[in-house]
Amino acid sequence: MGNEHIEDGKWWVSPFNFVDEVRKGFDLLQKVEIHDATLRDGEQTPGVVFRKEDKVRIARQLDAVGVERIEAGMPAVSEEDFAAIKEISKLGLKAKIYTFARAMTVDIDKAVECGAHGVIIEIPIGYPKLQYQFHWTWEDVLRKSVDCINHAKKRGLHTVYFPYDTTRARQEDLTNLLTRLMQDAPPDAIGVVDTMGCALPEAIKYMVRLVKRLTGLPVEIHTHNDFGMGVATELAAVTAGAAVVHSCANGLGERTGNAALEELILGLHILLGMKTSYRLDQILPLSELVSELSGVRLANNKPVLGKGNYIRESGIGVDLVMKTPLAMFATAPQLTGRTAEVVLGKKSGKTSITYALEQLGIDESRDEVVTEILREVKEKGTKKRGLLSPDEFQEIIRQKGL
């Protein structure tokens, strides 16, 4: 067992991620790209509206992070969306610009007019969708797909076929659709779309391998987080040979949201040990920008960027939080531009009090004094059902004549 799980001063994750028995079944590609859909699927979060200037700002920051592909929107939604995509396409970003399209040639033409490099063509294949919403068969899906895919290819667009609700399709429908599609209108890539976030990681791995076997094309994975497994599902897809993972910054999206960009980046780079070139120092500025413009605040315990990730109230290990953070966390706060913090409340211990006093320049070694301050801190935190503010702590120590 090597030291792939450790990067000095940056992270220390489980060494069992890298044992041969775990990794022998992996089919990792040398390069996996991120396709970020914050500007389209992220904006589908109820109540979220990104104006043209917002989309341009977010696109620039996504490019600063280093994502390979930006889904800039759906041109058919509005004239403003069309204009935003067109402007983003002219920015000269390193990321390639994609649009989202229905299986209609008019949407393909709009993608070309916007200057996009590629297009995501969406059409349903999930059996509940076909049976109850659209009243289609797989043959209907094929018929509606062929002309659109061929038109997109003829117009020079990188064409990703996106049969949504893939994970609730009947296997025979998916097999028949993809087999015939390869005969009549082969796209450039196929998406496995877990629209309802309801497939186990192992099921996703099976589906990625199935699609690769049926088509021989690169497979992309897009998941929602309904069962809380969005990122785990996409990382599982990568271990089965998926070439592209889809994301949204801060995990934005309908219902429970999409696989979060920041979590995917750390998962690829640290948990799977892939050598990526993403700018980890640009993740926090992106998150803050998206939070500001969307009006959707991150939960305190949100993975990677939640404000509570590096905060410690419990007295156990307080000294390590600041001096040796990898003893207490899997990743160092500085990795994503964060800082560790010790706070005071009901669950504090003597070490917490000593540390807080030191931060104020007070060297107090008398155990009885520290014990009394701790008692009052615990009492105050219990009564207010929360943490003490700096002013409240300083009032306690003023009363002790410190």
Image (tube, rainbow, N blue to C red):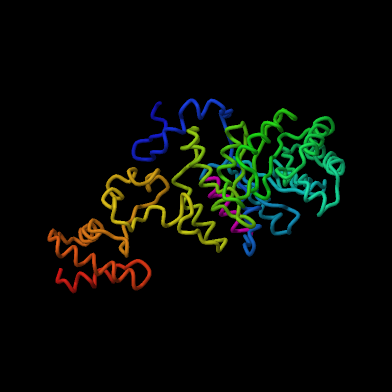
Horizontal side, residue 259 vs residue 389: left or right: right
Image quarter (top left, top right, bottom left or bottom right) of the C terminus = bottom left
Residue at the location (48% across, 50% down)? 303
Q: Residue at x 82, y 39 (%)?
A: 151
Q: Nearer the viewer, residue 66 or 376?
A: 376
Q: Position of residue 179 (x, y in %)?
A: 80, 31
Which residue is painted at 63% across and 53% down in the image? 39
Residue 69 shows in the view: no
For the stretch drawn in magenta, the main secondary structure is helix
The answer, for residue 320, to whether it is visible in the render is: yes
Residue range (magenta): 52-64
Q: Closest to the observer: 88 or 277? A: 277
Q: Is residue 171 placed above or below 349 in the rendered structure?
A: above
Q: Is residue 266 left or right of residue 112?
A: left
Q: Is residue 59 magenta?
A: yes
Number of numbered discs visible in the structure rendering: 0
Q: In x, y percent, where is residue 212?
A: 70, 30
Question: Residue 22 appears at what percent x and percent y?
Answer: 51, 30
Quick one: which residue is furthest to the left in this view? 366
Q: Is residue 353 left or right of residue 247?
A: left
- In the image, is residue 277 part of the stretch drawn in magenta? no
Give the residue at x 38% y 35%.
Answer: 7
**Position of 22 relative to 110 (above/below):** above
Quadrant the N terminus occupies = top left
Q: Is 392 placed left or right of 258 in the picture?
A: left
Of residues 306 and 20, the one drawn nearer to the viewer in this rendering: 20
In-front residue for pair 94/229: 229
Q: Where in the figure is residue 399, as x and y percent of width and height?
A: 18, 74
